[in-house]
Image (cartoon, rainbow, N blue to C red):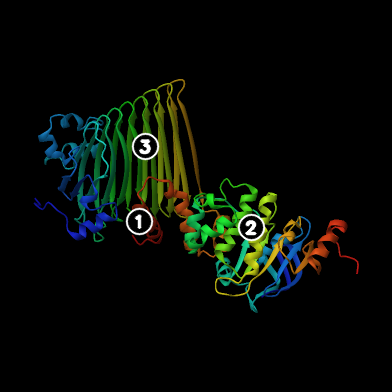
């Protein structure tokens, strides 16, 4: 579904990601582990097409087609979606208005209920939301978008334990169930705590450090290694 | 003189865009077309509507209301209206004491003559303890794009009167508009008003003055849009004259290449008064300008006055966020602009709100 080939990304003259390679097949969910500032969020933003990240070399292929020249909106329309770590607040635009603009207002109530956000439909987007509410809204936002490739930037951070289950189940459902057109989805999740792995079965994990992918392997094993050995390459 | 007493379907369609509804859905209706009050009809015995000329002949007290809040020689524009040789042109609306009017009262001004010159004087009296919703609008047919409209409005709100008013202006893109609005709020009166200026004009000068007595409450919102080629100057003056007077004056301005100058002056003349000015501007392009000048003047100890003002461009992070969700750039901008204008939080009826949303999209593309 998504293939990243020899990707080098920068901001101005500074290199942020270097020679990143990753393949995310249809139906798979991968997790991205790494210390703060390692480039994880930058990779997701680059896939989405957000400024100020510039592709200096390499390619991102979505279902075999390069996307580097596509706008944000075109990438979203192709079926790429991102749940932000720190989304902006937008005064005066309610969740309901946003869902209407997406043409998904008929989906809003049921998805909001699953994420315990039913009381938020008339609230302005991210205005006055707690950290956990923002994360739940970001997951709900992706459910309304119904993308085929879903990216989550630290979806569990700031979420209370009670709601981590909701978030995990929502992510699992969004990634594992086909989209509204019956197409198989896949996903990429950044996690610091690994808590989300208790609720979402991932297929592969990658360690990113200093803008490079250091190692890729089984998620549970790799996360156990990170907890004891840090963000390093496990011994063979 | 035009002797017709009703409106054509085309006229109704034009006015519908600025809030007109069938007479059966309104307590009273008054429509002024060019130089004539074409329609003045009330289905509520507690509401009287008629031409100002007729009101002057019918009720002695109206002559005391006319130019009661502004001197007839206050400036050249007002003198022009005051010194007209013809009978005064305008509406008179009287909501009688204690009336609790359930359906809105609607008044409209239509200028149908290209290069027309229209000078109007409207007077509204909301009597003691009365409560009413008002919808007012101004419009031209699409064929009229040049002309001049000068108006005076005098509004008297007697003790404990209440009014919720929405005003929508939709003039021609090359027109010059000058409007003077004066309001006197007696003890305990309450007012909530929303003024919407969306359609392009050449020049728009709007000057208003409100004097508020004890325990009065006024919340006013102005939604102001300036497309390229439009220059709007809005000057408001609010006098908090009685203890317990409280006002909140919010202006939300959007420039799509035009110029908006908003001078808002809040004067606390008594202890125990409370006032707030909010002036927020959003620029959609590098062209045009927004100047927000809130001024506070506390003349008595205990007058609590405050203001907030901001002017800026659309935040690219917000735009990118919406686009990354699959919303096209133009639609994302519209959503941000609508949010900025807080249409959902205004007292605008839902049907009119939808029309305003359409007007935003059209005004941005210059299609109005």
Q: In which quarter of the image is the C terminus of chain B?
A: bottom left
Residue A6 in the image, given as x and y percentages of width and height: 75, 73
Residue that protrudes farthest toward the bottom in the picture: A64
- Pointer 3 residue: B236
Mark 3 neighbour density, 10 Å: few (under 14) some (14–19) many (20 or more) = many
Q: Which residue is drawn at 32% across and 37% down?
A: B208
**Snapshot quadrant of residue B354:** bottom left
Near mark 1 (Cα within 10 A), the count class, few <14, some 14-19 or many ≥20, is some
Q: Which mark is residue A84?
A: 2
Q: What element carries label 2?
A: loop
Distance from Cα at disc 1 to Cα at disc 3: 26 Å
Residue located at (70% from left, 50% from top)? A161
Dot 1: chain letter: B
**Horizontal side of residue B167 vs A164, given as left or right:** left
Find residue A206 and report its horizontal and vertical position in percent. Answer: 78, 66
Residue at left offset 74%, top offset 64%:
A31
Nearest to the eye among marks 1 and 3: give it.
Answer: 1
User: Which circle's residue, 1 or 3, is located before the other in the chain?
Assistant: 3
Question: With respect to residue A135, does B55 lie above or below?
Answer: above
Dot 3 falls on a residue whose secondary structure is strand
> In the rendered image, is residue B285 in sight?
no
> Between B124 and B329, which is closer to the camera in this rendering?
B124
| Label pair 2/1, CB-CB below 8 angstroms | no
């Amino acid at each position: 579904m998504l293939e990243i080939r020899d990707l080098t990304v920068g901001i101005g003259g500074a290199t942020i990601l270097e020679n990143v390679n990753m393949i995310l097949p249809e139906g798979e969910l991968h997790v991205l582990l790494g210390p703060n500032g390692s480039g994880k969020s930058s990779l997701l933003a680059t896939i989405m097409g957000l400024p100020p990240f510039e592709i200096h070399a390499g390619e991102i292929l979505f279902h075999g087609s390069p996307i580097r020249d596509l706008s944000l909106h075109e990438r979203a329309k192709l079926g790429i979606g991102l749940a932000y770590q720190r989304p902006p607040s937008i005064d005066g635009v309610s969740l309901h208005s946003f869902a209407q603009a997406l043409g998904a207002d008929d989906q809003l109530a049921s998805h909001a209920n699953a994420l315990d956000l039913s009381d938020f439909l008339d609230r302005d987007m991210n205005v006055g939301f707690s950290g956990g509410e923002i994360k739940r809204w970001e997951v709900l936002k992706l459910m309304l978008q119904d993308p085929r490739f879903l990216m989550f930037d630290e979806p569990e951070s700031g979420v209370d334990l009670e709601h981590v289950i909701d978030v995990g189940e929502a992510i699992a459902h969004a990634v594992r169930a086909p989209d509204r057109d019956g197409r198989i989805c896949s996903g990429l999740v950044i996690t610091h705590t690994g808590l989300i792995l208790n609720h979402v079965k991932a297929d592969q994990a990658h360690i990113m450090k200093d803008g490079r992918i250091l190692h890729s392997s089984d998620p549970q094993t790799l996360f156990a290694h990170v907890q004891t050995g840090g963000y390093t390459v496990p011994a063979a | 003189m035009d002797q017709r007493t009703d409106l054509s379907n085309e006229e109704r369609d034009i006015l519908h865009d600025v809030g007109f509804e069938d007479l059966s859905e309104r307590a009273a209706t008054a429509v002024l077309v060019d130089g004539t009050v074409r329609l003045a009809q009330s289905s509520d015995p507690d509401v009287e509507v008629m031409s100002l000329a007729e009101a002057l002949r019918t009720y002695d007290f109206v002559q005391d209301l006319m130019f009661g809040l502004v001197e007839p020689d206050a400036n050249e524009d007002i003198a022009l209206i005051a010194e007209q040789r013809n009978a005064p042109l305008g509406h008179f609306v009287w909501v009688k004491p204690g009336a609790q009017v359930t359906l809105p009262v609607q008044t409209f001004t239509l200028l149908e003559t290209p290069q027309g010159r229209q000078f109007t004087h409207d007077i509204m009296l909301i009597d003691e303890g009365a409560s009413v919703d008002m919808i007012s609008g101004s419009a031209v047919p699409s064929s009229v794009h040049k002309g001049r409209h000068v108006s005076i409005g005098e509004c008297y709100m007697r003790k404990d009167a209440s009014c919720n008013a929405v005003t929508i202006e939709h003039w021609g893109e090359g027109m010059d508009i000058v409007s003077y609005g004066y309001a006197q709020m007696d003890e305990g009166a309450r007012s909530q008003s929303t003024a919407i200026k969306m359609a392009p004009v050449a020049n728009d000068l709007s000057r208003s003055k409100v004097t508020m007595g004890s325990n009065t409450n006024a919340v006013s919102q102005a939604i102001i849009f300036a497309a390229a080629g439009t220059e709007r100057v809005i000057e408001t003056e609010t006098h908090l004259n009685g203890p317990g007077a409280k006002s909140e004056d919010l202006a939300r301005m959007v420039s799509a290449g035009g110029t908006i100058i908003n001078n808002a002056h809040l004067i606390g003349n008594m202890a125990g008064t409370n006032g707030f000015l909010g002036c927020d501007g959003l620029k959609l392009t590098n062209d045009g300008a927004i100047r927000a000048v809130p001024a506070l003047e506390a003349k008595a100890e205990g007058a609590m006055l405050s203001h907030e003002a901001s002017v800026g461009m659309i935040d690219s992070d917000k735009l990118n966020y919406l686009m990354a969700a699959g919303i096209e750039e133009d639609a994302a901008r519209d959503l941000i602009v609508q949010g900025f204008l807080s249409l959902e939080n205004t007292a605008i009826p839902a049907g009119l709100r939808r029309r305003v949303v359409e007007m935003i999209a059209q005004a941005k593309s210059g299609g109005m």
